[in-house]
Image (cartoon, grey):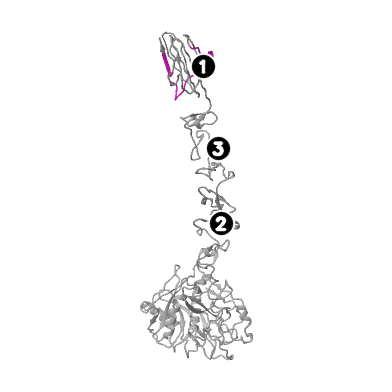
Amino acid sequence: MNVRTARACRNASAAALVAAAVVACTAEPAPEQLATTSSALTNAASSPQPTARIRGAYMKRQPFVQPTNCQSPQLQWGGGQVISNVEVVQVNWGPSVAPATISAFEAWYPKFVSSPSITWLKEYDANGQTIGAGTYHKNPASNGSWTITPANTGTTLSETAIGTELVSQIAAGHLPPLTKDAAGNSNTIYMVDFPPGMTLTLEGSNRSCVAFCAYHYSTTDKQGNVVLYGVHPDMGAGSGCEASGGKWVCGGSTDPTTAAEVTHSHELTEAITDPVMDGAWVDDNQGCGEIGDICANELGSCGDTSCASPSVGSITVGGTTLYEQTEWSNAQDDCVVQGPPVQCTTNASCTATPNTPICDATSHTCRACVAGDCTGATPACETTGGLAGECVQCTAANGAACTGGTPICDTSTDTCRACTAADCTGAKPVCEMSGASAGTCVQCDSTHTTACTGGTPYCGPSNTCVGCTQSSQCPNGQTCDTMTGSCVAGSGSSSGSSSGSGSGSGSGSGSGSSSGSGSSSGAGSGSGSGGTDGDAGVNEDGGNGSGDGGNGDTGGTGSSAGCAVSAAPAAGNGAALLPLGAFLMLGLCVRRRGGRRQGAHERSGM
């Protein structure tokens, strides 16, 4: 039954007396242990009731006394603090607290404070604080609760008297000191159980098990620290809080242990979300009260306290069933014992939910990725398009994730792939299709060398342009200038031979220089007298003398940069004759190798 359905089932004519904020319920099934015996409805109140809700108190329920003005509960944060990670110190007021109560809560608190019944309260994070799992501060001497010997031995105690005693016990070292969160807000709450026969009062004459079942409160010590505490009267036989005649009064159950757990959970949860009642989470606009007040003491389906109360819930932790009161969730618009059903525990649980691949560690729900979530084979978080929220291999904004043979991010699939011709531009205009660089954009390859110009005309093994080292690396018959690594235009060749016989003598010398490119070659022989002069890049043959058949700047066979002049064949005893054009070129043919130098060849004959 949700809160609105339950509200419709109430007897509105009996709402003249406004008691505690007891206005809502859940649809959770009642535990089997809860009483279900039907009995006649008793309308008479057994004792005077307060005319208004007491902030921080779990008010004692009277049959059909329900506020009617809390129609749409919505807790509002008023600027106050919450408890970030509650630390529970279980305190026994003297040695006479019921042993069953002590042992029950030494088992209940450690499991409950770290359960989903606490962590779901994260929806009420505020004041820069984050609500998370709590801890149970064990007494090392008892391995559980802390029993004090109060200096105040009175049997009727006000909230002020209880707070003063607790501060004194902490100062004396009989109770552990309080702890704080990073912002300096108190995390510790001292949850105090009282022995039978004690009367506790709140804000004047309001008495335990008459006006209220329990409450939470706060005080300050001499150092100004906020000391938080919960007050729980004995709920045993004769207390006025116990179930009677098959009807529950406090805790929504006729089972005493269940009723006590429900009551303790009510105060602990309210203390976490509104610890010092300074305007943290409360609905004061409609008189709904705190988180527990909204859901407390709802009647069962038969409209009587003889039915199990829908406000009682349970959770199983470590194989143990823990009973508790349901609490109001703004997010779920209902009274609940925990957050929405656990959707996931790991990211693997979220693979079937598109665009929400990450399991949130706090809410255990699948959500979209954010920066830092994505690692391994899918290191990028997509924020746009159909894959928004997914961890992917690459994105348009994170193409650097694509390397090796798949350097291109395909933004339609957010996957890395090999290049195509259209992908490669700028400094790397060629898509290599083979070899070690296959699939990548490169500067050049064996068939694409247009990017290789100037001093780097050759495409090297690493698909980058480099200087030439030999003419075979130059295109279109160009030759390699090994001094600059450039391919240069221009070439020439000559060949010739001469033969003859004769004798003679002579000498010749020559010098010159030339610049340009080309080659010359030739071969000749002769005998006789006479001589010829040679230049760099020139081949001369002599008649009646001897022809040059050596290598170097001039020779019978060889090559040189510059002009090429070759002799026509000579026969007999005559000299090999150079064509007229060749003689004219002799004055021009020089070889430049870093400047002018002496002609490369001198010969003498007979």
- Point out which mark residue 517 bears: none
Q: Which residues are magenta?
A: 576-603
Q: Which amino acid lies under the numbered mark 2 shown in the image of this protein?
A: Glu
Q: Position of residue 485 (x, y in %)?
A: 48, 32
Name the image quarter holding residue 367.
Answer: bottom right
Which of the pair 231/545 is nearer the observer? 545
Can you give x and y, in whole percent of width and height, for residue 561 in the image? 48, 23
Q: Quadrant of the N terminus?
A: bottom right
Instruction: Pinpoint residue 297: horizontal percent, then vertical percent.
Output: 55, 83
The residue at 36%/76% (across/down) is 140
**Relative to 47, residue 371 above or below:** above
Residue closest to the eye, 109 or 216: 109
> Circles 2 and 3: CB distance less than 8 Å?
no
Quadrant position of residue 219: bottom left
Question: Which dot marks residue 382?
Answer: 2
Residue that mark 1 sits on: 585
In percent of the image, x 39 and y 82: which residue is there? Answer: 147
What's the distance in space between the residues labelled 1 and 2, CA to CA?
A: 74 Å
Visible in this render: residue 161? Answer: no
The residue that label 3 is drawn on is 447
